[in-house]
Amino acid sequence: MFEELIRDWNGEAVAIHYDAPSGTWMFVAIHSTRLGTAGGGTRMKVYPTPADGLRDAMRLAEAMTNKLAIAGAAAGGGKAVLAVPAIPRGEERRRLLLAYGDLIESLNGAFGTAPDVNTDERDMDIIAERTSHVFGQSGAAGGSGSTAPDTGVGVFHGIVAAVDHVYGSPDLRGRTIAIQGVGGVGGVLARLLAEAGASLIVSDIDADRAVAIAAETGARTVPPGEVLGQACDVLAPCALGGILDAATIPTLRCRIVAGAANNQLATAEDATRLGEAGILYAPDYVINAGGVLHVLALEQRGWSREQLDDALRGIGRALTQIFRSADAEGITTELAAQRLAEERIRTGATVAGGATA
Ligand code: NAI
């Protein structure tokens, strides 16, 4: 029930609104404003019960706090969930989004939102009719465009940091990197890695897409079912979550897992499993922070491209710090990342975009 969830949560506040015409529960979970006002995406989803939607919002809000803290973004973490009975379309969707915009506006800037699962830039344009606390609008409405390219750049820096940590040199020439999913992020990543001299293996359920990227980058393509087991230095999951579990981890033949996909670990124990298998894992929410940095930099902070590029390189620097402290303390990189986030929240450290550390 809501009472228990809210009582047991370590976040700051939850705003709840029930939209009677559609039967939608709206949850805005504000986990932390310690480093700045809370930001996070709006997820639209059908949940078994409203409490499941609230639980998801709370969990994801906490993850945003950690992600933004490690990215040095001087922003707090939040998340919104629209727990709908069915995904609405057309006029019904528009009416719901306007009502949701009113809810955000009523929070007076305590929470700003952006697209997430089942919401896109057109939805943000509608929400913006009611509130200015919205990011990721369409280009025509002044949005900063797709986040995928900068997410890809951040993942690239993360891979370089991981390779440097494992092999003692950041040079990618001669390294083999397998990419699962060459869509918006994976495609950009493949190009950057190829330019840096890496040998690539690519895989996508959209075979034409894989073939096109392979033609551009000199990559070898493999069927989707075979990519995880490829012998390589780095496996870069850039498609789906939940791919690393008790069944798949023993089949991996890589030294590093470093990619954009959210929630790569099926369970918390899988971080330990990877460590025991001698595989260095770049925590997904650290290495894929380029998208959120893109939005903050270009839509809220007014950073120059140089400042954003430095913040993206900061993803590599944060990972190096995480890898070293995991080694020094004999803990998983997941736990080391969690501790770095806590330290940055405690000390109020913000390092991106030229802010002081
Ligand atoms: P996308 O939808 O553009 O690309 C995903 C690609 O993976 C598609 O080409 C799809 O055909 C392929 N794919 C799906 N299932 C597959 C499978 N079983 N095997 C091989 N390929 C498969 O998505 P995008 O934007 O590139 O994002 C990739 C991942 O990164 C997602 O997990 C996303 O949540 C995550 N992410 C993306 C960010 C962004 O800024 N776009 C930011 C942070 C995380």
Image (spheres, rainbow, N blue to C red):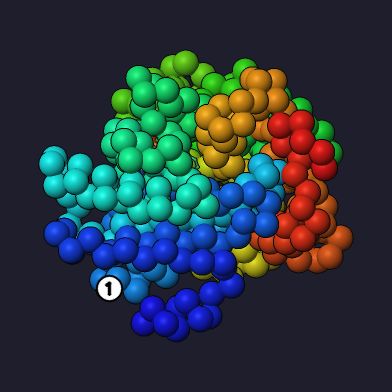
In what quadrant of the picture does the C terminus appear? Answer: top right
Side of 60 relative to 357 (left or right): left
Q: Residue at x 59, y 42 (%)?
A: 289
Picture quarter containing residue 119? top left
Q: Position of residue 65 (x, y in %)?
A: 60, 56
Side of 150 relative to 239 (left or right): right
Would residue 184 be visible to someone looking at this image?
no
Image quadrant, ligand 1 = top left
Q: Is mark 1 within 8 Å of ligand 1?
A: no
Judge by depth and name the residue closer to the eye, 169 or 36: 36
Q: Position of residue 279 (x, y in %)?
A: 67, 54
Judge by depth and name the residue closer to the eye, 151 or 217: 151
The answer to whether residue 153 is above or below residue 26 is above
Question: For mark 1, what is the residue?
Answer: 49
Q: Secondary structure at mark 1?
A: loop
In what quadrant of the picture does the N terminus appear? Answer: bottom left
Residue type at numbered disc 1: Thr
Judge by depth and name the residue closer to the eye, 116 or 2: 2
Would residue 10 be visible to someone looking at this image?
yes
Q: Residue at x 33, y 46 (%)?
A: 101
Q: Position of residue 206 (x, y in %)?
A: 31, 33
The answer to whether residue 304 is above or below residue 253 is above
Picture quarter containing residue 63? bottom right
The answer to whether residue 182 is above or below residue 76 is above
The answer to whether residue 129 is above or below residue 112 is above
Disc 1 residue crowd, few under 14, some 14–19, many 20+, Cα 10 Å: few
Q: Residue at x 67, y 57 (%)?
A: 34
Q: Residue at x 33, y 40 (%)?
A: 130
